[in-house]
Structures are given as structure tokens and as C-alpha cells.
Image (cartoon, rainbow, N blue to C red):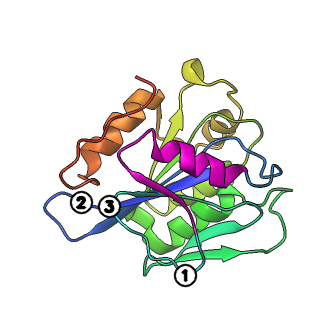
Amino acid sequence: MFVLITGRLRSSTQRWSAAASYGYNGRARRFVAGLAEWLNGETALRVRVADHGDQMQPGTVVLAPDDYHLQVTSAGVLELCHEPPYHGLRPSANVLFRSLAYAYGPHALGIILTGMGDDGAEGLKALKLAGGATIGQDEASCVVYGMPREAAALGAVERAMAPAEIGRALARLAPICEGQEVETAYE
């Protein structure tokens, strides 16, 4: 499972994008819609499931739908594709992170959170090589330290942080909810 968050840098028209990935194998149908509905009640940010051709919107969290890869273009357009599973997974965080690396390079932030396996590790490495910033959830706060460990082993993680620290870092990055204070979860 992964989410895409976008905003604008403080005092700038430059767009930034952040993608976060956490363990979910994509096999439980209709899980994502329920998750989006629940998250909408837990955060000041708007949370929704992506549709093909949607434009990224500041202050919006976008979830990849069941059984589709999510990609983003340099024009901020979301693309869903039903290409074969990547290493057995669809959606795959590797696909999203690679598209983010290609589209935004040094203006992107990738975050990999708790989860089993290695999904997202290769894509996060591609994002880092493209000049993007990368964060991995620290081992102490992970339920399963699989995905962040694999990303760290590849040299893809610049900083390891607990979820509360990640939330504070995102809140400092840009005012993504105009007129609203962004609360961070897991405090």
C-alpha cells in the first residue's frame, strides 16, 4: 500500500511530491476504499482512492486502488496501469517510486514504512539516485521491519525516523492544508 501527497514549497510555486509505502499485499479486494473512508475521519487531509487521469491536488492523500499500479507524470497527472505484477505485487511501491523519480527527481520525497518483504526498496533507491529525499521508518517503531530494512540495505534510506517524526517533517516541508493545522498520527 502506498500513498501520494503533494504540495507547494513555502514561498514558491515549485511543486513537491511525497510518496509513502507500507506493507499491504494488494490481495484483499475492496480494502483500499474502506481504508480511505476511515483515514478521512482521522486526518485533516483529504484521503481518496486514485482514478486514472486525476490531477494531483495539494493537501490530498491518494491511495493506489486495488489491483492497479499507480504512477505520476511530470504534469502531476495520476496514471493507473494494469501491467503485470512487479515481483508478484500490484500495486507495487517500486512502480510509484520510479515514476516519482522520473517525473520529479530532486523535488520528490519517498517514505517507506513498516511492512513485510522488499516492495519499494528498489524504487526508493531510484528516487534517491534521481536526487529525491528518502526516509525509512526506524526499526524501533516498526511492527514488521522488512520493507524499511531492505531499503536501508540497498542504501536507499537517507534518514530513519519514527512515524511521529515523519509527520512533523512533512508538516515543516510545506503548508499542505491551507488554513488548517496538520495533526500527525502516532504521537
Task: Name the residue nearer the viewer: 153 or 171.
Answer: 171
Task: Name the residue nearer the viewer: 83 or 68.
Answer: 68
At horizontal 77% and vertical 63% (from top left) the residue drawn is 67
**Stretch of the chain drawn in magenta:** 31-50
At horizontal 67% and vertical 62% (from top left) the residue drawn is 65
Image coords of residue 64 (percent x, y) = 63, 60
Quarter where residue 14 is shown: bottom left
Image coords of residue 174 (percent x, y) = 25, 52
> With 111 as the anchor, is 174 left or right in this view?
left
Which residue has dot 2 on it? 9
The tag earlier along the polypeptide, 2 or 1, is 2
Q: Amino acid at mark 1?
A: Gly
Q: Are marks 2 and 1 in contact (CB under 8 Å)?
A: no
Q: Disc 3 and disc 2: Cα gap in Å? A: 7 Å
On screen, residue 131 above or below 72: above
At horizontal 45% and vertical 78% (from top left) the residue drawn is 74
Quarter where residue 94 is shown: bottom right
Label placed on residue 53: 1
Residue 96 located within the stretch drawn in magenta: no
Q: Secondary structure at mark 2?
A: loop
Q: Residues within 10 Å of mark 2 (few under 14, many from 20)?
A: some
Q: In this orientation, does residue 64 appear?
A: yes
Residue 41 located within the stretch drawn in magenta: yes
Q: Amino acid at mark 3?
A: Gly
Q: Amino acid at mark 2?
A: Leu
Q: Secondary structure at mark 1?
A: loop
Which one is in front in this view, the residue at disc 3 or the one at disc 2?
3
Q: Disc 2 and disc 1: Cα gap in Å? A: 24 Å
Image coords of residue 68 (percent x, y) = 73, 67
Q: Disc 3 and disc 1: Cα gap in Å? A: 18 Å
Task: Name the residue nearer the viewer: 86 or 126.
Answer: 86
Which residue has dot 3 on it? 7
